Structure formats: structure tokens, C-alpha cells
Amino acid sequence: MSNNKHHFFVDGKKFETDRTALKGIEIKQMAAIDVTFQLFLEGRGQDPDSQVSDGQDVILDTPPKQFYSVPPATFGKS
């Protein structure tokens, strides 16, 4: 069993796990993000940011991944 910790950031806060991959919903749960929010992975260098679905596996490699959350769209609501 490995003692390696994998670090990642969500909305600027650092988290760590001993797992090498997490699903989008697991990242939201660890970061206490509302499940209705969207999760995005910041692109590296010139790569664009990408949305992470709840069921999507994300490999936690190095350098640490940076995620951010976005509340659901409120278009059309009064």
C-alpha cells in the first residue's frame, strides 16, 4: 500500500487523498460544493478549462490539478 498523497485544489483550497483518481462528484463532496454546481478543471498553459461531470474520473497527477466551481445558471429566473 502506498503512502503517496495526491494533492489538488478546489476554489483555492488544498485537498489531499491517497487515491490516484476521483470522480467529479467525489471532488465536490470533499470540497463541500453544492451538487448542483458545475466543476471545472483549469487548463495548463494554453489548454482551455474543461467541465468535469459528476461521473467523470479525474487522474490526480502532478503538478496538482486546479478546479473551480460555478453555480448553476439562473437565466430566465425572475
Image: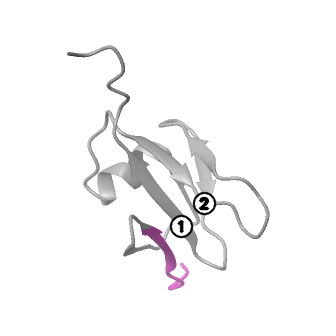
Q: Amino acid at mark 2?
A: Glu
Give the distance between the C-alpha atoms of the residues marked 2 and 1, in whole angstroms.
6 Å
CB within 8 Å, label 2 to label 1: yes
Image coords of residue 5 (percent x, y): 49, 81
Residue lying at 77% horizontally and 59% vertically, measured from the top left: 47
Residue lying at 58% horizontally and 42% vertically, measured from the top left: 51
In front here: 75 or 10?
Answer: 75
Q: Residue 36 lies in what quarter of the image?
A: top left
Can you identify the residue that label 2 sits on?
Answer: 42
Image coords of residue 28 (percent x, y): 36, 50
In the rendered structure, which segment of residues is drawn in magenta?
1-9
In magenta segment, residue 44 = no
Q: Earlier in the sequence, mark 2 or mark 1?
A: 2
Q: Is residue 51 above or below residue 44?
A: above
Q: Is residue 40 above or below residue 65?
A: above
Can you identify the residue that label 1 sits on?
Answer: 66
Callout 2 environment at 10 Å: few (<14), some (14 to 19), or many (20+)? some
Secondary structure beneath label 1: strand
Image coords of residue 56 (percent x, y): 58, 40
Secondary structure beneath label 2: loop
